[in-house]
Amino acid sequence: MSRFKGVGTFLLITFGATWTVEITLYLQGFSLANPLVQILSLAWIAPAAAAFIVRRWVTREGFTDAGMALRLRAAWPHYLAAWLGPLAFAAAAVGIAAALGLWRPTLAPVNDLVPGLP
C-alpha cells in the first residue's frame, strides 16, 4: 500500500504544481509556448521536489538505498549506452532521412559564417 501511496503522491505533487502554474499563467493571457512561462511552470523542478518529499515524508524510505552511487564496474555497458545511445539515434535518424530523400546534406550554411570565403 505504501508503494501506491508514494506513486500517487508523487504524481499529484508533480502534475498538480505544474498544471496549477501553467493554467494560472494561461488564464492570465500568457502563451504556453513562451519560454518564460515554461521556466515558471515548475515542470523542470516539480518531479525532483516531489521525489524528495515522497521519499522523505510519505514513504519514509530515506536516501541511503536510492541507487545514486556510481557502479561503473558492474554497470559500465549501461553508462556507455546512456552516453552514446542518443548520438547513435541521431545519426540513424539523419541517415534514414538522407536515404529516403527527406534531407539533402549541404554545406551551404557554412558559407554564410565567414563572408567572402568560398
Image (cartoon, rainbow, N blue to C red):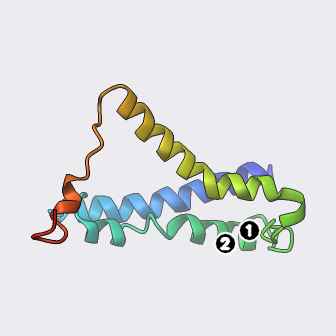
Q: Give the residue type at disc 1.
A: Arg
Pointer 1 residue: 55
Number of marks in picture: 2
Q: Quadrant of the C terminus?
A: bottom left
Residue 37: assigned label: none
In the image, residue 37 sits, relative to residue 1, either above or below, namely: below
* Label pair 1/2, CB-CB below 8 angstroms: yes
Residue 85 appearing in the image: yes
Above or below for 110 versus 57: above
Amino acid on which disc 2 is placed: Phe
Q: Position of residue 50 (x, y in %)?
A: 60, 66
Q: Residues within 10 Å of mark 2 (few under 14, many from 20)?
A: some
Residue situated in front as seen by the camera: 91 or 25: 91
The residue depicted at 39 percent of the width and 28 percent of the height is 99
- According to the image, label 2 marks what residue? 52
Residue 30: image quadrant is bottom left
Q: Is residue 9 something that shows in the picture?
A: no
* Mark 1 residue crowding within 10 angstroms, few (<14) / some (14–19) / many (20+): some
Q: Position of residue 94 (x, y in %)?
A: 41, 40
Q: Is residue 85 left or right of residue 59?
A: left
